[in-house]
Image (cartoon, rainbow, N blue to C red):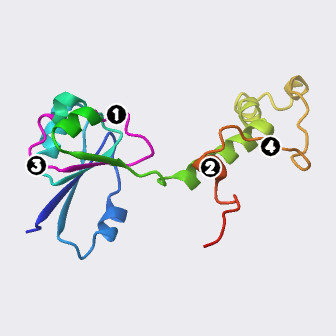
Amino acid sequence: MARHRLVIISNNTLDASPMEVELAGMDYGIRSLVCRDAEETIRAVQGSDLIIDVRVPLPGSVIQKIDRARGIVSLGHAYDQIDCEAATRKGIMVVNTPGFCTEEVSNHTVMLLLAYTRQLVRLDRLVRARRWQDGALAELPPIPPIEGQVLGLVGFGVIGAGPWHARPGP
C-alpha cells in the first residue's frame, strides 16, 4: 500500500497517466475522480495527502471538510475557484502551475486568428447550407493574403510570448 495518497479531482474525465508516469517509483497512490458537486468533492478528497484540482470549485465549505491534505495544486495558471483564505486558515498550502498549457493556448490562439482571417466559419456555414455556388460568396469581404500582414499582441504575458519569443540564454 502506498504511503502517500494523491487525488486528482476534475469536472470532467481526465487522463491521469502523464502524472502517474511522473510519479513512477515514488510512494504515491493516485486516484482520479470526476466531481460535479460539493458532496462528490468532499468524498473525493477524504484521506488524501495532496489534491490536484482541475477546474473543480473548492469553496471554504469544502475546504473545511478536508481531513488530511496539506496541499492543493491548481492545475493551471489561476486558483480563483479555490478559497485560498480558508485553505490558509486550515494550514493547507495552495499552489498553481503557471507553465501549464501555455504553448497549447498560444497555438490555439494562432489557429483561431488564422481561421478568422481566412473566414473559415463563414465559408464552412455556406458549404453546409449548400450555398457555395448561389452567389453567397459575393456577400463576403475579400480574403487578403496572410503574407505581409502584421500582428500586434496586447497583454504580452507568458502565453503571448509563446515558444517563438526570444529568451536570453543561460
Q: Which residue is mark 2?
A: 106
In this picture, residue 169 sits left or right of residue 92: right
In this picture, residue 153 sits left or right of residue 26: right
Task: State if disc 1 and disc 3 touch (CB < 8 Å).
Answer: no
Write the residue at 90% across / 45% down: 145
Q: Secondary structure at mark 1?
A: loop
N-term-proximal mark, 3 vs 2: 3
Residue 97, percent from left and from top: 41, 52
Q: How many marks?
A: 4
Q: Which residue is mark 3?
A: 68
Q: What are the residue bounds of the magenta stretch?
A: 64-83
- The quadrant holding residue 82 is top left
Residue 37, percent from left and from top: 23, 31
Q: Which residue is mark 4?
A: 151
Q: Is residue 40 in view? A: no
Mark pair 2, 1: CA separation: 23 Å
Looking at the picture, which amino acid does disc 2 mark?
Answer: Ser
Q: Which residue is mark 1?
A: 81
Q: In this view of the protein, which residue sits in the foreground, 139 or 71? A: 71
The quadrant the C terminus occupies is bottom right
Mark pair 3, 2: CA separation: 37 Å
